[in-house]
Amino acid sequence: MVYEFKLPDLGEGVAEGEVLKWMVKEGDSIKEDQPLVEVMTDKVNVQIPAPRTGTISRILAKEGDMAKVGQIIVVIDDGSAPPASPPTPLPAPQQALSLPPQSPPVQPGPDILATPATRRLARELGVEIGTVRGSGTLGRITDDDVRGAASPQPKVAAQAPAMQSQEPRAPAQEQRVPTQGAKEEVVALRGMRRTIAEHMAKSKQIVAQVTHVDEADLTDLVQLREAFKGSAAKRGVRLTFLPFIIKALVPALKEFPYVNSSMDEASGNIILKKYYNIGVATDTPQGLVVPVIRDVDTKDIFDLAGEIEKVAVRAREGQLTLEEVKGSTFTVTNVGAIGGLFATPIVNYPEVAILGLHKIAKRPIVRGGRVEVRDMTYLSLSFDHRVFDGSYAARFATRVIEMLQDTKKLLAEVV
Amino acid sequence: MRQADVTVIGAGPGGYVCAIRAAQLGLATIIVESDKLGGECVNYGCIPSKSLITVSRLYDKVREGEKFGLTASKVNVDFTQLQKWKSEVIDKLVAGVEFLLKGSNATILMGEAEIVGRGKVRVTTLDGVEEIETKNVVIATGTKSVQLSGLEFDGRVVIGSKEALELTDAPMKLLVVGGGAIGLEFASMYQKLGSEVTVVEIMDQLMPGSDPEVVRVVQRKLEAKGGKVHLKSKVLSVTKTDHGATVAVETPEGGFLLDVDKVLVSVGRKPRTEKMNLEAIGVLTNSAGFINTNEKMQTNVPGFYAVGDVRGPPLLAHKASKEGVVAAECMAGMKSAADWKVIPETVFCDPEVASVGLTEAKAVQAGYNVKKSRFQFAALGRALSTGEPEGFVKIVSKAEDGLVLGVQIVGPDASNLISEVALAIEMGATVEDIALTIHPHPTLPEAIMEAAETASGRPIHQLKT
């Protein structure tokens, strides 16, 4: 029998994945659970094992193709039926293979207001035209409506399956094709680069982004960290500033709930999150990934430091699972490691705010009428102006800075 | 042994279009035809019947020309010349099909095809037997006339539509059994060519399923010209005589005997699938033997497609052709599907009838809040000046928003008028859209605009009801 293997549900919010690499080719035999294909989903790679033993009859999703969850990606013949074309005698009818479709063609009803060309577009993009909400007169479905429906939409909740994740390969490298003139080089947008590109562009398209910048005096925090370094080392963790900053965020996020929210455009609701999962933007050789530190309000700085260190290593090694990059409610990004005064980070959609951290440097600051040398940093808060206004953002940022500057208060939070 | 990606069986409007498109898409394509390229449509259906119908109308118009001031001393129908001209029309189109197939690099095999297994087709040609190994098979073998027991075709007196197109004279008395589209086209045509026509239909109206208001216009015209229509009636027996036959007809009013020269039986069509070995391959059909497919024209057996009449009613060439395109595109890996909303239908009786989308009855049945609006050709300048004022345009729309659900036209050139409204429905147009579109004057399509204006409550050329 021929088995049509569909791209399985890869976990929360994943509607599609890019086929990175087939471990088999057509005609190969394969054993159940043997690595079959590597698929790239939202920033992590998943290696999917063979669902059964057999021969690969046809590979339907080629490397570089985007495959939707539920789409048939490979046909495996498990050899339990006679070969498709016996010498001369006709195959008995009961052995006839049934293709899935046996319902008669359904014609679109008169109420589906989409032109024939729009209906064709929907078909080509794999969109069920009857499910598209038309934006035009009488609910007329436009090409744009169809394209909108075709882009993956975040689903809510779903268990991520246990899948081995696999080291992502550097994007594009093998895909380079020199153009005729050799003055330009064509690099295919593949893998993680494509995911990042789509994600960033989507955020910029949807979010009404504004960046608020302020500075913070971290002189006391620098000392506080020094004081804690010893006990951190005893616990085997390296203490950076990040755990302190995350802890400083918690009371501010609780006080300003709209910063820890997301907007559901479809229903026109703002969802306030009563849990605090902080995404930590992490630079890796393959590109930017955002592993998530969950429930930071319940963890102390040593736990946080340990976790951050662990996911950073896993991120660099491409070992992150889907579960580890999903579900953040607010993101911090350290953009000051290489240089620059401050940057305006892009909101990690569907979140509504992101905090940019920058280098801590000694600068002359006027305090009490005197110039002092202090450990200063800039903080940039990019936020979605659809969800809250600049004054709200400024008050939130001020609250975070207060926490960072007032180590007594912070101390109450960090341990 | 020949190798192919696609083997199309049957070169009618479904098959040949499929083969052209498949070949255009780079698939190695073989098309097999046992009779003539172009199939039923070009050779024994649409094209020859329209050729004869055109001449019958011309003849009729000239004979009735006196009221327009047109007198002709002697007008005769030379059937030999008429048949010759008809054949020339057919030959041109057959040559055109061959030209297109060859030009697209499809291979034509003339012979009888038989499916002998998955991916295996055997073709018996004049030169011997050819075996084809093919990735896909498209069954486009169409249909043939249903024969009634006691009314078997004899090629002389009891005939089917194919023979009715080959007659060398108009029968004095013609009995048409079956008042559907084909039966009525022949009834109108031979009536104009001089036959005394009787139509026997078993259902309670001609063209069952059509809008009764529309059918009434056709029946009235047929009867006004001396024809007889018997509804809820059937032929009990046919006794052959020297010159024709004596037919016993049973009607609700009682039975009677009728002497006729020819009996044309057009009571339906059945799929032509004997050589397709459907059962052995496992291809599923419905109870009437028509092949089941999905919207991609795929049967339940991988590699087997079916397009056109062999899939079942409505049996229409234009539908078959579109299905052929869909099948070819799917075989080439494109995301194609039959997703049209409507399929227009035309009947070349007198006056012509054309319909697209829902009739009033079907729209009500489907639960729509229906608004109907009509415009009579009798109030239209161009219809009067053509001398064909019978009939009307009827628009069935949604009462709430004016969305066009269906249009029925009975009247002059209805077959050419219907495409405008087919497009309107596919585009999701409302009656307002049609009403606000300027239609040139004086033309027949103005009737559609007028009916739409009536539907939107702003009629000019008829009074508000």
Image (cartoon, rainbow, N blue to C red):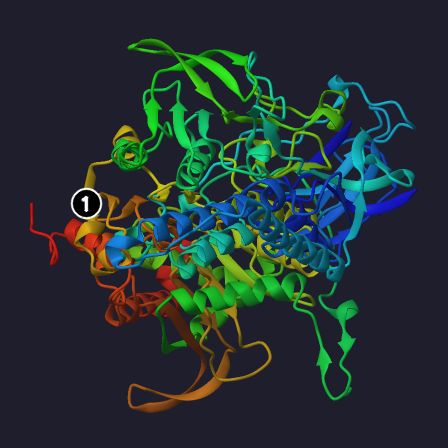
Relative height, residue B231 to residue B419 (above, below): above
Which of the 4 image quarters holds residue B113? top right
Pointer 1 indicates a residue of which chain? B
Q: Position of residue A269 (x, y in %)?
A: 29, 50
Q: Position of residue B404 (x, y in %)?
A: 28, 47
Residue B312 visible: yes
The residue lying toward the viewer, choosing from A91 and A23, is A91
Q: Which residue is mark 1?
A: B373
Q: Position of residue B59 (x, y in %)?
A: 41, 49
The residue lying toward the viewer, choosing from A112 and B449, is B449
Q: Is residue A309 left or right of residue A86?
A: left
Quick one: SS at disc 1? strand
Q: Is residue B144 left or right of residue B95?
A: left
User: Residue, x 50% and y 57% (percent of image)?
Assistant: A279
Q: Quadrant of the N terminus of chain A?
A: top right
Residue A64 visible: no
Point out the residue furthest to the front here: B73
Q: Is residue B344 left or right of residue B392?
A: right
The residue lying toward the viewer, choosing from B143 and B395, is B143
Q: Position of residue B168 (x, y in %)?
A: 58, 39
Which of the 4 image quarters holds residue B383? bottom left
Q: Amino acid at mark 1?
A: Ser
Characterize the local packing of mark 1: few (<14), some (14-19) or many (20 or more) Cα atoms within 10 angstroms. Answer: many
The residue lying toward the viewer, choosing from A64 and B242, is B242
